[in-house]
Every structure is written in structure tokens, then in C-alpha cells.
Amino acid sequence: MKINRDEIKNIALLSRLEVDEAYMEQVEKALNDVLSYVTELEELNLEGVEPMAHAVPLQNVFREDEVKPSLDHKLAMQNAPEETDGYFTVPRVVQE
């Protein structure tokens, strides 16, 4: 399947993309290369091939939770520009 300039312009319009005429030839070649590759893939015999979610096996990379001491409250509050009842005071961002 080949794609022509008019189709590219229509797709760009629908996608709200601007394709500069100076690059139209490169865009046309790139899209036709992709479509040619997809056509090759469609010809492959995939009978018996299991679908997969990822190209490489994944494993959980999360670490175990560890209880660690936190920053001392007084030390944290000593740099607060404003404080009310032991909490940071910040400007209101939600109007009522």
C-alpha cells in the first residue's frame, strides 16, 4: 500500500498537524517505508505464536518497604516561612 501527498495532507489536517511542503517528500518516504514494513509483517506465519504484552520479560523492580527514621519535626519547621499550630502555612489556592 502506498500513500500519496493528498492523503498525507488529509491525515495532517485531521490530526491538526502542520506538514511543511519542504519536508513532504521525506514524510511521504517515511510513511511508505512504515506501510511496506507492516505489509511484510502481515505475510508472516504466526500460527502457534503466543501473544505477548512486552518484548522482554519483566519483573517487579520495587524494593521492600523499610521503616526508617523521618526528619525531626522541629528541624523541618525551622525553615518554614510561616507556621500555624506546628504546620506549614501556605497561600490559599482554592477560592470559595
Image (cartoon, rainbow, N blue to C red):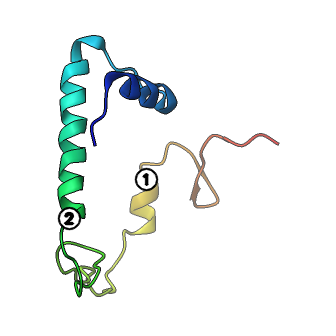
Identify the amino acid type marked 2: Glu
Question: Residue 78: which numbered mark, if any?
Answer: 1
Element assignment for label 2: loop
Foreground of the two, 59 or 27: 27
Asked if 29 appears above or below 36 in the picture, the reply is above
User: Where's residue 56, x and y in %?
Assistant: 16, 75
Placement of the C terminus among the 4 image quadrants: top right
Q: Is residue 22 above or below residue 11?
A: above
Q: Which circle marks residue 43 in the picture?
A: 2
Q: Residues within 10 Å of mark 1 (few under 14, many from 20)?
A: few
Name which residue type carries label 1: Gln
Label 1 element class:
loop
Q: Residue furthest top?
A: 22
Q: How many marks?
A: 2
Q: Nearer the viewer, residue 68 or 8?
A: 8
The x and y percentages for residue 89 are 60, 48
Whole-percent x and y of residue 90? 59, 45
Hey, which quadrant is residue 24 in on the image?
Answer: top left
Q: Nearer the viewer, mark 2 or mark 1?
A: 2
